[in-house]
Amino acid sequence: MVRGESEDWLPTVNDILEHFDATPRGAGSCASTAPAPSVTLPAPFVLILRMARGQPLSVDQRLRLVSCLARATALTEEDEKCLEPWLVYKLACRACLYRQPSLAADIYEQLCSLATTGRSVYWLQGLATLSRGEINLLTSVGELSTAVKNSPARPWLPRLSSTLHDASATVFKARTFFLSIGDRAVNWFQTDYLETRAAFLACLAELCLLLFHAGCSSRCARWTQLEAMKNPHVASSASSFPTKNPLIVLQTLLPAWDSLLTNLNALIQRCIDADLETLRHLKASIFQQSIFFSFLEMVRFFRSTLSELSDTSSSDDSVARTFPWMRESVGANLDCLDQTDGPASDSLQILLSQFQTQFAKLSSHPVDDSITPAQLLANFTFQLSTFPVCLPRFFFKRLQSTSIRLVILPKPSSPSEPLILAQEMGLVLNVMGIVSQKSPRIDLMRRVTAAELVMTISRSASSASLSICEDSSLSNFQQTQRRVVPIQRDYFHTEFCLTFPRPLEPGSQSSSGGSRFSTSSTAELYRVFLEAFLLDANGLRWRLCGTSSEAGVGESILVRVEPRSSAPSVDFTQPVSSQNAALLKYEVVEESKTEVSCAT
């Protein structure tokens, strides 16, 4: 990577290594107080990875780096011959953070033989597989560099598509190792992140394949040839044929990109405990950089670009109206990235800057056919594939933990048992919650100040077993209430007043106007679901990821609404004492049904 004039004063990797070669033993450890070799990675070695700026270290540089680390952290000559495994593991994690997959893969593969537990083996194998897959991707893409420069017809797109498919399969393989650890509550971020990463690579692979089949010009040459064969009396000039857009096939990719964008947004919303480096897209900092920001913006860009390019209107006409929107979008992204300085900011800024320059040049010369939107999109996809993945810090370390416990009263003693209500009655639910936040630091990175509660009432699927007939107004019934409750001393409390629709009586008119036939019981079963979201001091909305695949923390209860028709009939021709006895008997039965346990 070319260094700018303002960076000439900064030391290079070789300069720092030469300085370490002359450093005496134990310079990087607390030799006066530590009884054993240090297991803390010295900051100068992190500086080496930062100054590499994503360029892979040579084999000689990697060996010198490890040798200098052993000498700097050793207390004796014997300690210099063997590095602490935990110290080497930290070096590999830093290598993943600063785009050095070759160094990370070599270390992870050697540490696998030293692991003593199954969880450690699966963890290291997953990291090694992921790093080795990035190396294979970079190697294969590097072999295509010459073909990309010398082949304007883009015959390299199928090879790039195959390479991206292989990389996606490797990421899925690495994900299986993390799933084998078994603790979903701990490794949910790693598995979900890798699933999103694999889907992103698969979408890029499909995009390359469709760009190749559609052609990289605004008018597909094959379409022109077929039209010439069909109408031989018409001149062969391309201007005589009606303008068509072969890129409409790209619209078949929109569902996949929409799904990817939804999953990525949901993943980001669950990262309430992530550090600022991982969540810079939510809270800008001039010293931090988030891989998620670049990841999210890339997905949004590809989705929006495909939507524009797959328009059924003319390609030549759509280019002019597409450029201003895309130029404005990319420019806004660059404005945010220009204020950052981190492990992934430089490469991303250069990539987007080059893309913006090419688009500006193309928009200023719309008649020039040397570059088309499809060509520019293909080049951008190739350039994006040349950068190794920069794993976020949250992938390896959690700096705080947040948990919440919800309590709903009244609540049945068993989740399968419903509360029983008469149709004229409402239900008042008391909601209480306790939020716990812990951090090894003195101050929390992100403090929760309020809880947003969403109460949803819907008709339960098992309600059909209670009634033969169906009412469309009840089957489609759904009611939602939202409320923001402040958290005081880790505790919040509120109440919800719920009302349920009245079931139709036997023989009454349904919503469609016809009579409704019913059995002796027309009770309806409803599901009340409460989901809790957390709000921080900046008003940002967060979910908590539980042990299941569903995000968020929630509680649900079943409510059975019984109409008066379900009550036993009273013979009013009998004496008053008999009528009262029948009514009292019914009330006692109903009272016993509505008893619920209030135990928490």
Image (tube, helix red, strand yellow):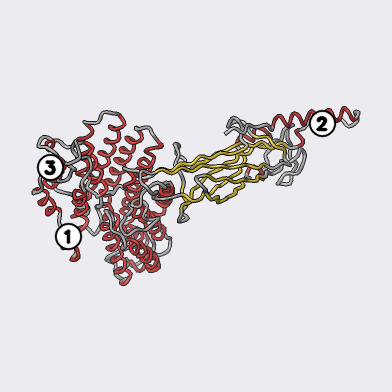
Label 1, secondary structure: give it.
Answer: loop
Mark 1: give few (<14), some (14-19) or many (20+) Cα within 10 Å.
few
Q: Nearer the viewer, residue 307 or 43?
A: 43
Mark 3: give few (<14), some (14-19) or many (20+) Cα within 10 Å.
many
Of the numbered discs 2 and 1, the one sitting upstream in the chain is 1
Tag 2 residue? 583
Q: Is residue 54 visible?
A: yes
Say if 115 sits above or below 133 in the image: above
Callout 3–callout 1 Cβ contact below 8 Å? no
Q: Nearer the viewer, residue 420 or 130?
A: 420
Q: CA distance from mark 3 to mark 1?
A: 24 Å
Classify residue 51 as left or right of residue 415.
left
Residue 111 falls in image quadrant: top left
Classify residue 473 as left or right of residue 576.
left
Label 2, secondary structure: give it.
Answer: helix
Callout 2–callout 3 Cβ contact below 8 Å? no
Q: CA distance from mark 2 to mark 3?
A: 91 Å
Mark 2: give few (<14), some (14-19) or many (20+) Cα within 10 Å.
some
Classify residue 153 as left or right of residue 312.
left
Tag 3 residue? 71
Of the numbered discs 2 and 3, the one sitting upstream in the chain is 3
Say if 256 sits above or below 414 in the image: below
User: Which numbered mark, 2 or 3, is in the foreground of this view?
Assistant: 3
Label 3, secondary structure: give it.
Answer: helix
Marking on residue 10: 1
The residue positioned farthest toward the front in the image shown = 32
Q: Quadrant of the C terminus?
A: top right
Give x and y (percent) for residue 153: 25, 58
